[in-house]
Image (cartoon, rainbow, N blue to C red):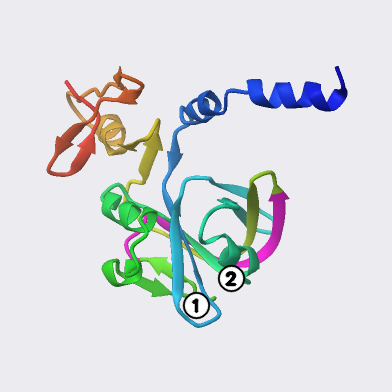
Amino acid sequence: MTESTTESITQRAFDASGFRRALGTFVTGVTVVTTIQPDGSPRGFTANSFTSVSLDPPLILVCIAKTASSHPVFSATQRFAVSVLAENQTDVSGVFASKAQDKFARVPWDTRKTGAPVIRDAAASFDCVTHDVVDAGDHIILIGRVVDFAQTSASPLGYCRGAYVNFSLSQEALSAAGRAQVGAILEHRDGLVLVDTPRGLRLPTG
C-alpha cells in the first residue's frame, strides 16, 4: 500500500459530519462581518467563527469559507467591521445569513472610522483595517487591526448546537436579591430545548 493510498483512506474515514457536530458543542457569540465593496456598496454575512488575537496591537480574526459568496470580497478588502449581536437581534442574524439582496435596507447600521458598516444596537462592534489574510485549508483567516470599538450593556446572543442561546437569565439570577430562577440546558434529538417567549427564545426555567 502506497503512502498516497494510506492518506486517501484516512481522509475517507474521517467523520466530517461528526467533527462539525463536536465543534458545535462550543458555545459562541453571533457576529455580522461587514465591509464596503469597490463599487461603494456594503457587503456582510453572519459568522460565529470570531475571536480575539492580540491586545498589543489590538487584533481580532474571523474565518471565511473559500466557497462563500463573500470570500472574494473579504479576501481582498482593506477594511471591515465585526458587530457582536445582542440577544434581541436574532432577526439580524437571519437577514445576514440569508441570500437576500437588500440586507442593509432591512437592518439599521452606521459607519465609523473605516467606513465599514456597523450594526446599530449591537452588544459590541470592532472597526478594523486588514492586518493579514492567512490561508487555512478550506477557509481563510481574516485578521483585523482594531482602530475603533464600542460596547453596550446589551446581553450578547449565543449559539450552540445549531440553536440560539441567550445569557441574560444567568445574569439576572446572579444579581437577584431574593429567590432566583434557575435555567437548564436540555438536549433533545441532537438539539437544545428552548422556550419561545415574548423576549425571544430562552432556556427552560423553574
User: What residue do we see at 48% from left, 30% from top?
Assistant: 26
User: What residue do we see at 58% from left, 23% from top?
Assistant: 15
Residue hosting label 1: 115
Instruction: Give me the disc on residue 38.
Output: none
Secondary structure at numbered mark 2 = strand
77 in the magenta segment: no
Q: Sequence order check: which comes first, mark 1 or mark 2?
A: 2
Image quadrant where one finds the N terminus: top right
The residue nearer to you, when weighing 58 against 85, is: 85
Secondary structure at numbered mark 1 = loop
Residue hosting label 2: 79
For the question of whether residue 147 can be seen, the reply is: no
Query: Which image quadrant for residue 77?
Result: bottom right
- From the viewer's perspective, tell me whether residue 195 is left or right of residue 73: left
Q: Do the numbered discs 1 and 2 sit on residues whose CB atoms are within 8 Å?
A: yes
User: What residue do we see at 32% from left, 61% from top?
Assistant: 121
- From the viewer's perspective, tell me whether residue 46 is left or right of residue 60: left
Residue lying at the far bottom of the rendered structure: 39
Image quadrant where one finds the C terminus: top left
- From the viewer's perspective, tell me whether residue 16 is left or right of residue 168: right
For the question of whether residue 131 can be seen, the reply is: yes
Spatial CA distance of label 1 from label 2 is 8 Å
- Magenta residues: mostly which secondary structure? strand
Vertical side of 205 occupied by 98: above or below: below
10 Å crowding of disc 2: few (<14), some (14-19), many (20+): many
The residue range painted magenta reads 120-135
User: What residue do we see at 32% from left, 70% from top?
Assistant: 102
